[in-house]
Image (cartoon, grey):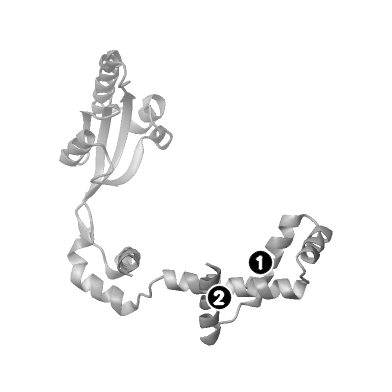
Amino acid sequence: ELVLDELIYREAVAAGHRPSPAAVDTEVSSARARFGSEEAFAAALRENGLDEAAFRERLGRAVVVRDARDARSRPEITEADLAAYYRENGPKFQRPEQVSLRQILYRVDPADQATAAPAEAKARAALERLRRGEPFGPLARRESEDEYRVKDGEMGFVHRGRLDREFEDAVFAAPVGRVRLARGLHGFQVFEVLDRQPPVRLTFEQARPIIAERLARQRRVEG
């Protein structure tokens, strides 16, 4: 490892790389902080036959090697690479269908199915109250048994794949603006779909960070 570091250092210096004084200052400050006092730091230098100038030189070499290693581990990805990948794979970059959703959850203990009947009764009663015109938000704050109750049951936009399967099927089949009841993984859920947005292809700018990560991962594996 020491030999490899020396080879990396010589190669980097030959290519014109020098340690940033600011980076070396940061390393020196970090080392000082580990000793607790200037006296302890100075004593440690003396014990290792170093003065501060020699110590800074060693840290400078370490900075050059670290930066060179980091540069090698980060494959270079150009703008042309990103654009070409998007041209070839653009149709795959889709934001899935999503809905704006609010819910009131009545939990069922999976270890005690005796809790299912009371939870369902509460959910059906809440559904009827909402259908008669009771406001959704206050009811959610009073009765919902999940973290969204503090937001009047509002979950924001959710896309396919985010919800448990049973609840998701009911949500994405429901019309906008109608309260519904479903049995999901966590219990009985009274919900309303507030808005629906169809799948949308991401623009190049939206897809850019995803493409960059995919290409970097692919090149690390290949390299």
Regarding mark 1 in the picture, which secondary structure is present there?
Answer: helix
Asked if residue 203 lies left or right of residue 1, the reply is left
* Amino acid under disc 2: Glu
Q: Earlier in the sequence, mark 1 or mark 2?
A: 2
Closer to the camera in the image, 4 or 19? 4
Label 1 to label 2: alpha-carbon separation: 19 Å
Regarding mark 2 in the picture, which secondary structure is present there?
Answer: helix
> Could you tell me residue 121's position as x and y percent?
26, 16
Snapshot quadrant of residue 139: top left
* Amino acid under disc 1: Glu
Residue at the image position 20 percent from the left and 67 percent from the top: 89
Mark seen at residue 6:
2
- Please count the marks in the image: 2
Is disc 1 surrounded by few (<14), some (14 to 19) or many (20+) residues within 10 Å? Answer: some
Residue at the extreme top = 114
> Could you tell me residue 128's position as x and y percent?
24, 23
The residue labelled by disc 1 is 27
